[in-house]
Structure formats: structure tokens, C-alpha cells
Image (cartoon, rainbow, N blue to C red):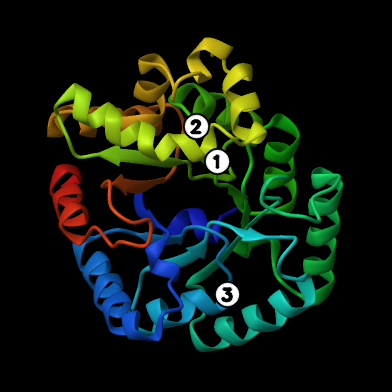
Amino acid sequence: MSNPVKDTIGRYGIWNIGLRSEDPQRRGELREAAAELEELGFGALWLGGNSTVHHAVPLLEATERITVATSIQSIWQYDAAGTAARYAELEASHPGRFVLGIGASHAKLAEQYRRPYSSLVAYLDALDAAGVPAGRRVLAALGPKTLELSRDRAAGAIPYLITAEHTAQARRILGDQALLAPELKVVLEDDPARARELARDTLALYLELPNYTNNFLRLGFTEDDLANGGSDRLVDAVFAWGTEDVIRKRIDEFHAAGADHVALQVVHGGPREFLPREGWARLAQILA
């Protein structure tokens, strides 16, 4: 049985929060960036932060082939019925080019947070009832239960802030058919001190969220690895940095571990909404 998402998004995509900007003055910039990323050969644009269907519209309008996906839409902020209605409109205008990435977010980020797994299952039930195909949605999944849910109720999984070892574990759970598209942060810097400084600036937010820290502990990291901004061991496992050859090898490790597609987030040290277009162009050269 084919997996339409897996068959169309290619091996590499770009993950970025700025691509979901709602600032009308940035609309032209977003369109230009999306068209440029398609020209560079990336297969998917992953809209970071709490993104939803309408954030994909300007990017789809500016491109012809590239897939646009949410990574992720919080199940607490956007109800399933409204999401399904907007999905149907987008599918009618841009058939087969949008993927709905959803997840339960984090207790510190969502006041309604409760029984996340059961709530995610209920949300999928509501999407089923409203006509959103399982094959056009993916789940933010870290632990075994949610990975199994990704396999059984969606096109696959989009794990965030993980290691190549986690990717191998996820592939064993998902089997061969489901999409596995982990996110990987890339620091285009070969000075170890500067690269790890940039990495830790980005990592700080996530070390305050138990979903991620608990996953690191399951992977064999210790509380010491999580302290003081993250150990070198932790940073080096979840970020790709170094020379261009080293960065390419680190990305290849995730494919070798079982990833079908890797969503690459260029870490640049600037504002979270910044679009690192020069970095994306350089990354495309590394992957060529």
C-alpha cells in the first residue's frame, strides 16, 4: 500500500517558525522564501510553532509542487471541526499538497492540557468524522504509544528534538509503511564553542518542557546532561554542526537510522521569526 505523503515529500524539508508569520507586511517575503525553497529542491515546508491550516495558504499560492505542513497544530487551540472545514477548502484549491501535523503540545504551553494521549485520540476521531483522511495527517510523537498511534491513525510521525538513536527506535515501532520525518537542528558553524553556544541558546526553551526531557532520559541521557544548558554530549546528539562534510554525515545518520525525510531547522542565533535564506541556500548546496 502506498503512502501519499511519504511518496511525495522527498528526503529533505525545511522547518521554520517564521514561515507561519501572520504579519501582512511580510506576506511578500514569505512567498519569495517559499518559491526559493522549492527551487532549491526541498520537498516540504514545515511551519513551526503552533501553526494551522490558514498559515499554509500564502506558501501554497506561491509554489507549484512543494508540500506544506503544520508542525504542529495544537489540539487544544484549534477545534477539529473548524480544522476539517479549512482543510477541505485548502484541499480543493491545492489538492494533495497540504499535510496536517497535529500534537498535544505541552502542559506549560496549553492551559487546557489534560490526558494528552486520550485527548489526541478523541481529536483524531473527530477528524475522521469530519472527513480529514488519515493519510493526510501526521502526529508529533516521541513515546511508543504515540508512535503506534501515528502508525495506526495517520500517515506517520514527525518527532521533534530527537537523536538518530530515537529515529531507529521509532522506525521499529512504525514499521516500513508509515512516514518517519524527524526534525533536526543544523548549526552552520564549525567552531565548536560558537556552534554549541548557538545550540544551547535554542535548546534552553526545550529543557524546560518535561515531554522532551523525559524523552532524553528514556534515551539514556542523565540529569547531568540536562543541566546548565545541556552537556556537550546532548548538544552533539540533537544538533548537526561542524564542517559541511560533517553536517552532511550527521544528516545522513538520520536517514540511515530509518528516517524517510528529515525536516531541517537552520539555527542562526537571530529572532525566532527570521527566515535564514542564505543558510537555506548553503544547506541545499551541502545536500546536493
Q: Nearer the viewer, residue 156 or 280?
A: 280
Asked if the residues shown at circle 1 and circle 2 are in contact, with their CB atoms under 8 angstroms apart, the answer is: yes
- What secondary structure is marked by label 1? loop
Q: Amino acid at mark 1?
A: Pro
Asked if the residues shown at circle 2 and circle 3 are in contact, with their CB atoms under 8 angstroms apart, the answer is: no
Question: Residue 104's spot in the image, x, y percent?
Answer: 71, 50
- Which mark is on residue 2? none
Q: Is residue 111 visible?
A: yes
Q: Residues within 10 Å of mark 3 (few under 14, many from 20)?
A: many
Q: Gap between marks 1 and 2, in whole Å?
A: 7 Å
Q: Gap between marks 2 and 3, in whole Å?
A: 25 Å
Q: Is residue 220 visible?
A: no
Q: Amino acid at mark 3?
A: Val
Earlier sequence position, callout 3 versus callout 1 = 3
Residue shown at 84%/47% (left/top)?
114
Residue assigned mark 3 = 53
Question: Residue 125's spot in the image, x, y percent?
Answer: 84, 61
Q: Amino acid at mark 2?
A: Ile
Residue shown at 58%/43% (left/top)?
177
Question: Residue 103's spot in the image, x, y percent?
Answer: 67, 52
- What secondary structure is marked by label 2? loop
Q: Gap between marks 3 and 1, in whole Å?
A: 20 Å
Asked if the residues shown at circle 3 and circle 1 are in contact, with their CB atoms under 8 angstroms apart, the answer is: no
Residue assigned mark 1 = 159
Residue shown at 36%/69% (left/top)?
66
